[in-house]
Amino acid sequence: MRSNLKLTKTNDFVTDGKAEVTAIFLHGIASDSSSFNTFFEYLREKKIPGVRVVSYDLLGVGQSPKSDEYNYDLDEQMAAIENSLAELDVDTPIVICGHSMGTMLAERLVDKYIRIGRGHMIVTGTPPEESGMLVESKVAPAGTILRMVLISAPVYTADDIKNPIFDIAMEKFCEAVAERDAEIVKSKVFQNELESIIKNPENYQYLVQASVPTTMIYGKKDNIIAAFNYPGVLEKNPLIKAVETEGAHGVSPEKFTAIVDAIKGKTE
């Protein structure tokens, strides 16, 4: 794993007025941060107030570094995310937003850190007096992770992954991606993310452990995410809420209102 890995920031703007919260967006597999572009345009057009939007391309896609020397596995992607966020100049609390595989990276990030940015990557469990979290006002310190917004979050159990049906589902997923771009499926980035992130049962345990309010937004026609497991997650952790919308797996207009409400904490 390369500890000096960093991502390319692709967006950094305030929707309207003064930023009250910074929303950081992590995209999914076989994609890049442009998957959020239509939603970002919606934020600008509607002049949604008070949201600073920050997005990155993950390693190996879009504008971020690419090299045959990289593994593009979970460890490298997480290292690049952490290194990039450590340098983020932020003066508001933070909302971590992910789509598809990006939700799994978000869950890992929130499990590890309670505060990020400006060189302050404060890990979970750090005493308040050492973390700078002790404040008399009710306003969270800059960089504090307030909540998560998970769009089309896959929620598989270890038993699901052992089931032959899971392999069939993954094959169909790869076929769907190949129809759009056959070269992506053959790439080292796609194959290593699929194996080390999507197919790794360990990565599905972090959602249930979420320590911040979390909203899961999903389309009722999404056949990728194992939404039948959502009720079990909600039962285990009262901090997690689910919002069903029209649509399928993408970051589609049917989800836009729900995403905005979740970023602003209206679904908690």
Image (cartoon, rainbow, N blue to C red):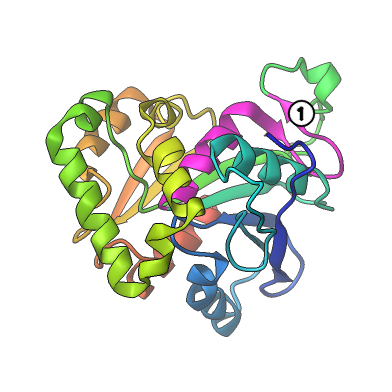
Magenta stretch holds residue 111: yes
Nearest the viewer among 222 and 254 is: 222
Q: Is residue 101 positioned above or below 156 on the image?
A: below
Task: Give the x, y percent position of residue 214.
Answer: 46, 40
Q: Quadrant of the C terminus?
A: top left
Residue carrying label 1: 122
Residue shown at the point (25%, 48%) measured from the top left = 170
Disc 1 packing (10 Å; few <14; some 14–19; many ≥20):
many
Task: Give the x, y percent position of residue 218.
Answer: 31, 55
Nearest the viewer among 189 and 141 is: 189
The quadrant holding residue 22 is bottom right
Nearest the viewer among 183 and 84 is: 183
Which structural element holds mark 1? strand
The quadrant holding residue 75 is top right
Residue 7 vs residue 163: left or right? Answer: right
Q: Is residue 23 positioned above or below 109 on the image?
A: below
Task: Give the x, y percent position of residue 8.
Answer: 72, 61
Question: What amino acid type is highlighted by mark number 1?
Answer: Ile
Nearest the viewer among 214 and 111 is: 111
Magenta stretch holds residue 153: no
Q: Quadrant of the N terminus?
A: top right
Q: Is residue 238 positioned above or below 64 on the image?
A: above
The region drawn magenta spans 100-123
Residue shown at the point (74%, 73%) measured from the top left = 17
